[in-house]
Every structure is written in C-alpha cells, then in structure tokens.
Amino acid sequence: MSRLYVLSVLSALSAVSFAAPKPQNWNTVHYDYAGVNWNTVNYGGGQPATVATTPVQAQVTTVAPVVPTTTPSTSTSVVPQSVSSPAPSPSSKSDSGSSSSPSGGKRGLAYNPSSPPLDIFSSYSSIGWGWDWDSARASLPSQYEFVPMLWEPSRADKFDSDLASSPASYLLSFNEPDIPSQANMPVASAVAGHVQYMNKHASDTVKIGAVSVSNGASQDPNAPMGLDYLKAFLDQCGQSSPACVVDFCPVHWYGCPASSPCSVDDDFKAFQTSMTNAISTCNGKPIWITEFQKIGSEDEQTQFVKQAIDWLEQPAQAKIERYSYFMVSDGILTNGDSLSSVGTAYAST
C-alpha cells in the first residue's frame, strides 16, 4: 500500500468528518412554500394527541397533485375528490342546521408571524376577519375579528387560556387531521378530541367549526382524506354521545401543482365543484374556505382570485359563509410591505 494512497484515503475521510450538513430549505421542497419564512412559523409539530380511541394510522396511498399544507410536508400527494351522500347531522345549536351569519364581511386574512404588517389591508372594507392557525391574534389589527384555532389537542390548555382572556364568537377545530404532517388524527380520535375540547366552548353566541380538511383523496378507505374524511367525521360525530357540536365546516382547496399545471378556467371549475360538494357533505350547514389557492404565476393567481371572488360574493353562494386566500406572505398576497397584484385583486374585487 503506497504512502500516496494512504494520504488520499485520510484526506477523503477528513472531508467527510468535517463537512457540515446543509439545513433543509423548505422553500425549495415544494412550490407551495415559496416566500414563506417557516423559521418563524410555530404551527407544526406539537405533541401526540391525548384523546381516547387512537387506532394506528393506516398507510395512505395517494396520487398527484400535491396539496399545500400549513407546515412543510414532503410526502403527501393528493387530488381533488368529489363527495356525495351527506352524513347524518351532528349536534348543532340551530334547528335549521346552519349557524347565524357572521356580522363582518366574508373575506378574511390567513396570516402567520412572518406575514408583513397587516395594516396594509386597512383601507379595504372587504376584509372583515382573520386567523393564524393559533389561538392568539398576534399581529391582526383590532378592526378585524379574530377567529382562534385549536390546531391539535395538545394545545388545548393554551387555547382555553387565550379564550378566557380574549373571547371569540367563532372557533376552529383541528387543522387538517387528514394530513400526516398536520394534526394527523384518525377520525375516531378527532371526534373524541372535538367533543372533549371544543364542545365545552359552544353557546348561543359561540359557533364551533368542524375539523378543517384538505382537498386530498386517498385510495385507502381506512385513511380517508379531504371531504371523505369530513364525511366520516360527521358520521361518527352523529353517533357519538354526546354528539359533536358543529355549526359550520372549514375546508381547504389547492389547484393543480406546478408540475402538472391547469388553466385558470379549469382550476376555477374544479374549485366550484369542490365547494358545492363540501356544502353537501356538511349537510347543508355553512362552509368556510379557510385556505385556497391557485398555483401559478402572479398573473394567473390574479385572474383566479377575481373569478373566485365574483362567484363567492354572489347571493347564491350564501352557504359559503367565509373565505381566506392562502396567504398573507411575500410573493403571494404581498410584495415586501405592499400588496401584490394578487393581494390588490383579493382586497379590492
């Protein structure tokens, strides 16, 4: 063995030993996360759910396209899924099966700690509320109604404490329990958790949302996603004793991915179909579209936003009670500390 060979091996080992691993840049993992500073986002992770009835999550077999989620994910690929056959209605405080309409406008802001100052929307009367995947309003200006969320059961103590100091009229239950990187809960666990942690906040003046679901689809019936998950949740809520209190259903929708793009018109038609199916799945109760986005260029998103708002604001869409585009972030609704063309269209259309 030559001295030159030994030196070359030692040199290679030295390079391996001292090479620093590169940190994961979530903004390069999926197109969904471009412009989002995830270092400041505290919505992912958390502790395992502590509620009863937690069967092992079945392996999900899914197909493209990818649906963006609130926190980074590298493994969940889904497609829009049509759903029929409404589930039996869970408990509600309204005999008509719908919550009383919110007093503010339908249009809201989905934001997080990395969002630019939200007062750039203050001159637009179309915006009436906001939410941030958390139970504290953080940077939301006082002119807007804040809607708290219990992201997952392990955050219930903070949720209760925040509500005690800052009561709210509308509450959001768990975030995307149908997605492994999000609340990640089997349906039975989500039902038990909702009854345990959400029901107690219900009153004549406080309305409770169902769990927020993606627009995903699973080929595994034991691990439903999207509206299939919502239907199973409402079915089991109706059979639970006590039943879940559900006044409205939050849903999420994302268009075709950049890897398999759709036209603005095709995405808009898919959006309409998905929301119509969501209303049916929610047993005629109101729905809230708390996340939605057309994946594409700024011009394409601007066109989509204008079409979507024209449709969402029609009297015929009264069952779509509130909506918020994903999200107040640089490169989406804002450019720096100013509104982007998408943001201007969203605020002014």
Image (cartoon, rainbow, N blue to C red):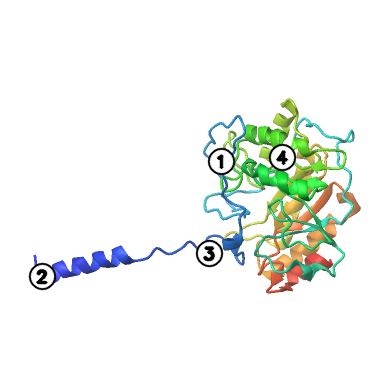
Q: Which residue is labeled 2 in the image? A: 3
- Give the mark toward the camera: 4 or 1: 1
Sequence-first disc among 2 and 4: 2
Disc 4 or disc 3, which is closer to the eye?
A: 3
Can you tell which of label 2 and label 1 is closer to the viewer?
1
Query: According to the image, label 3 marks what residue?
Result: 28
Mark with earlier residue (2, 3): 2
Asked if the residue under mark 3 is in contact with the one under mark 2, i.e. CB atoms within 8 Å, the reply is no
The residue tagged with tag 3: helix, strand or loop? helix
Amino acid on which disc 4 is placed: Val
Coordinates of residue 272 in the picture (x, y in percent): 77, 51
Residue 212 in view of the camera: no
Instruction: Give the CA distance from mark 2 to mark 1.
Output: 55 Å
Mark 4: few, some, or many residues within 10 Å (few <14, many ≥20)? some
Horizontal arrangement in the rendering, residue 24 relative to residue 96 (left or right): left
Residue 48, which numbered label? Answer: 1
Q: Nearer the viewer, residue 162 or 298?
A: 162
Q: Nearer the viewer, mark 2 or mark 4?
A: 2
